[in-house]
Image: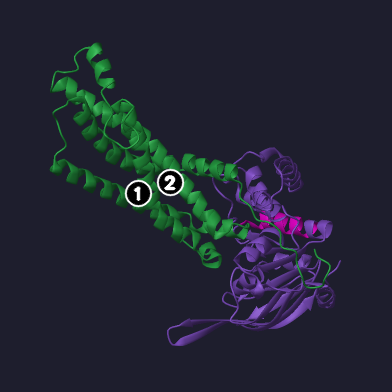
C-alpha cells in the first residue's frame, strides 16, 4: 500500500497466454459433446468445400459450376449460424461462471480472449477433420463413380495433382494446399461466428451474472 | 494497521426503477467496519443484504452515497482498477459456491493468484497450504463435481483468501448446506478471521452466525434497523436465565 492515506497502489492484472490456452482446452474437454457438435458444423462446411475443390483438381475437366459455388456459399453461412447458436448457448450456460471470473479479477478482454481461443481451437480441429472427410469423399467418388482410383498407383498420382490456383499455394500439391485453405477457412468461420457471443460474454455485468439462473 | 476502517459506507442508496415504481433496495446506509471485524448482516428477504454485498464488493454502483474500501472511494475507480480491487482486496464467497467446474480444487484456488501475477511455484505452494488449512489436503486434484457442498465451500473459502485480501465477503455462505456442515463452515470462517486478521462480512439468514460475529447489522427495507454487538448479545442471553 502507498504512503499517502487513501491511495491504493494499483498493480497489474494479467492472464498469461499459456494459462488462457490451458483453460480453453479444459473448457473444451469438459464439454466434449457440445464442442463436437460445433466442430461438426465446421467439418461439414469445410468438407463440402474440400470435396468440390478436390474433385476439380483431381479430375481435370471438372470445373466448379456457379451452382456449386452458391451451394458452397450457403453452406458456409449455415455453418456460421450454427456455430453462433452453439456459442450463444454456451455463454448462457456459463453466465454465472463468467460472473465469477470477473470477481476473481478478470477484465472484459480476458473473457473475450478465452472464448476466442476456444473458437480458434474449434476451427483448427474442424479444419483438419473437414479436410480429411472432404478429400476422402472426393477420393471415394473417384473410386466408385469414375473408376479412376482403382489402384494404389492411381491414388498416389492423384495425391500429387498440381496445386490449386490459390494465392501463395501454387507450389504445393493440391491436397496439401487444400489443408492450408481448410484450416484458414475453418478458423475464420469459427472466429467470425464467435465474435458476437464472445462480446456478449465479455460485457456481462458481474452482479447480474452471478444471480443468473439458466 | 494503517487504515482504521476497512469498509465505510456513506449514505449508501440503491434505487431500481420498475416501470413507474421505484424500488429502494438500499436507502441510506451508514456503516463503518473495522479491520479484522467479523460482521454479519441479517434481515428478511428483500431487506437489501445482497444489494449491500454488491455495493461493498464493487460489483454494482450505488445510486447515491459512497463506498470506501481502505479509504478509497471505489466509485472513482475505472474498470481496470475495479478488477484489481476484486482480485486483490476482496475475497468472495457465495451461496452457490461458484467454483469453476472445469478446474480442480487446486487450480480454482490458484486462479486469483494467476491474475495477480504470482509465479507458478509460489501459487502452487500457497494454494496447497490454503487447501490443507481448510481440511482438503487430500482432495487437491478433485473437480467441483467430485466434491460435496461443504467441501466446495471450503475450496471457495481457500480461494477467497488466495491473495490475502483485506475483506472476505460472504453472501449466504451456509444457505445451501445442512446444519452440521454449515456450522463447520461458520467456525472455519471465524478461525480464519482470527488467524489472519481479515475482515469478514457475511450476509446471512443463518442464526448460527450470531455466535461468531463481533457485530450484527439488522437490515429492514433497505435501512439499518439496529446494530448489536457481541457484548450486548451475551448480556441479553444472561438476562434470560
The main secondary structure of the magenta stretch is: helix
Residue B114 left/right relative to B102: right
- Position of residue B185 relative to residue B139, above or below, is below
Specify the subunit that label 1 lies on: A
Magenta residue span: B177-191
The quarter holding residue B42 reads bottom right
Q: Nearer the viewer, residue A21 or A61?
A: A61
The quarter holding residue A37 reads top left
Helix, strand or loop at disc 2?
helix
Circle number at residue B126: none
N-term-proximal mark, 2 vs 1: 1
Q: Which residue is mark 2?
A: A119
Q: Nearer the viewer, residue A170 or A64?
A: A170
Is B182 within the magenta? Answer: yes
Q: Which chain is purple?
A: B
Residue at x 31% of width, y 25% of height: A173
Amino acid at each position: 500500500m502507498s504512503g499517502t492515506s487513501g491511495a491504493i497502489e494499483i498493480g497489474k492484472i494479467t492472464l498469461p497466454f499459456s494459462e488462457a490456452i490451458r483453460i480453453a482446452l479444459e473448457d473444451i474437454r469438459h464439454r466434449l459433446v457440445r464442442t463436437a457438435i460445433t466442430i461438426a458444423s465446421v467439418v461439414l462446411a469445410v468438407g463440402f468445400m474440400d470435396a468440390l475443390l478436390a474433385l476439380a483438381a483431381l479430375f481435370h475437366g471438372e470445373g466448379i459450376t456457379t451452382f456449386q459455388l452458391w451451394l458452397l456459399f450457403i453452406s458456409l453461412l449455415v455453418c456460421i449460424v450454427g456455430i453462433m447458436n452453439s456459442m450463444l448457448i454456451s455463454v448462457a450456460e456459463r453466465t454465472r461462471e463468467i460472473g465469477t471470473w470477473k470477481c476473481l479479477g478478470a477484465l472484459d478482454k480476458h473473457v473475450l480472449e478465452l472464448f476466442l481461443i476456444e473458437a480458434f481451437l474449434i476451427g483448427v480441429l474442424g479444419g483438419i477433420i473437414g479436410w480429411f472427410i472432404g478429400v476422402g469423399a472426393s477420393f471415394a467418388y473417384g473410386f466408385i463413380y469414375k473408376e479412376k482410383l482403382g489402384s494404389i498407383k492411381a491414388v498416389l498420382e492423384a495425391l500429387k495433382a498440381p496445386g490449386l490456383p490459390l494465392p501463395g499455394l501454387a507450389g504445393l500439391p493440391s491436397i496439401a494446399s487444400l489443408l492450408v485453405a481448410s484450416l484458414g477457412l475453418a478458423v475464420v468461420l469459427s472466429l467470425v461466428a464467435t465474435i458476437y457471443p464472445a462480446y456478449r460474454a465479455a460485457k456481462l455485468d458481474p452482479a447480474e451474472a452471478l444471480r443468473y439462473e439458466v | 494497521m494503517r487504515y482504521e476502517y476497512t469498509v465505510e459506507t456513506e449514505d449508501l442508496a440503491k434505487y431500481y426503477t420498475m416501470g413507474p415504481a421505484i424500488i429502494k433496495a438500499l436507502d441510506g446506509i451508514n456503516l463503518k467496519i473495522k479491520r479484522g471485524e467479523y460482521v454479519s448482516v441479517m434481515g428478511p428477504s428483500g431487506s437489501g443484504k445482497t444489494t449491500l454485498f454488491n455495493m461493498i464488493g464493487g460489483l454494482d454502483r450505488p445510486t447515491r452515497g459512497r463506498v470506501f474500501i481502505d479509504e478509497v472511494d471505489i466509485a472513482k475507480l475505472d474498470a481496470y482498477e475495479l478488477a484489481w480491487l476484486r482480485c486483490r482486496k476482496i475475497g468472495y464467497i457465495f451461496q452457490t459456491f461458484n467454483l469453476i467446474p472445469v478446474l480442480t480444487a487446486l487450480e480454482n484456488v490458484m486462479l486469483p493468484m494467476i491474475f495477480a501475477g504470482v509465479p507458478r511455484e509460489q501459487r502452487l505452494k500457497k494454494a496447497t497450504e490454503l487447501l490443507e488449512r481448510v481440511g482438503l489436503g487430500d482432495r487437491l486434484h478433485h473437480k467441483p463435481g467430485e466434491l460435496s457442498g461443504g467441501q466446495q465451500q471450503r475450496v471457495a473459502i481457500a480461494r477467497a483468501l488466495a491473495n490475502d485480501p483485506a475483506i472476505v465477503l460472504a453472501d449466504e455462505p451456509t444457505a445451501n448446506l445442512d446444519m452440521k456442515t454449515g456450522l463447520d463452515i461458520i467456525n472455519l470462517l471465524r478461525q480464519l478471521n482470527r488467524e489472519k486478521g481479515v475482515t469478514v462480512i457475511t450476509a446471512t439468514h443463518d442464526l448460527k452466525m450470531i455466535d461468531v460475529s463481533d457485530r450484527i447489522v439488522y437490515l429492514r427495507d433497505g435501512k439499518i434497523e439496529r446494530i448489536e454487538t457481541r457484548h450486548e448479545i451475551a448480556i441479553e442471553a444472561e438476562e434470560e436465565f
